[in-house]
Amino acid sequence: MKQEPLKVWEKIVPNTWIDYNSHMTEGYYGVAFAEASDEFLIHIGFTSDYREAKGTFYTVEAQIRFLEEVKEGSLIYTQTFLIGFDSKRLHINHELFANEGSSPVATQEAMLLHVSKIDGVPSASTIENPIASNLLQLSIEHSEIERPSHLGNGIRQL
């Protein structure tokens, strides 16, 4: 049983992702996590055929924590694990690493909703196979991964 996060996405930070402070601007952390979510979905069986026949996923909630600066040319990659899922939603955690570092430089916790369009109107719908069965298997594989203390915390109030 594989009890470690998935490493399904990586990229070299391009110059266009760098801001006037000479580090990766916050918007591109969002891009990185969105691309990582797409790769996670592909990993669990989300294909163009599935999307056309059964539905898609919308990110309905996400929180990013910025922990360290990332510089141009850094190799960044995510480690992603499934926190949980039900018939219509999946809850994932991404940790972004840079240059094979041992601590994440950023994290994103996200809730994705399965959506189908009925007469062109998006509506929450049940996750179908093969994704549902793949999520069940992945939840077993990821059940022993230690949960970070920040999960579910939201933004601190001042």
Image: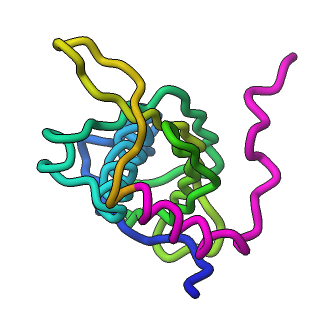
Q: Position of residue 99 (x, y in %)?
A: 46, 72
Is residue 72 visible in the rendered image? The answer is no
**Of 87 and 48, which appears nearest the observer?**
87
Q: Quadrant of residue 63?
A: top right
Residue 66 x %, y %: 61, 42
Judged from this view, the residue extending furthest toward the bottom is: 1
Across and down, in percent, residue 110 comes to: 55, 40
Note whether 121 is above or below 13 in the view shown: above
Q: Which residue does the image show at 42% across and 44% down from the upper left? A: 24
Q: Quadrant of the C terminus?
A: top right
At x 75%, y 39%, the residue is 152
Residue 148 among those drawn in magenta: yes
Q: Quadrant of the N terminus?
A: bottom right
One can see residue 125 in this view = yes
* Range of residues picked out in magenta: 132-158
Q: Residue 82 sits in which quadrant?
A: bottom right
Per the picture, the main secondary structure of the magenta-coloured stretch is loop
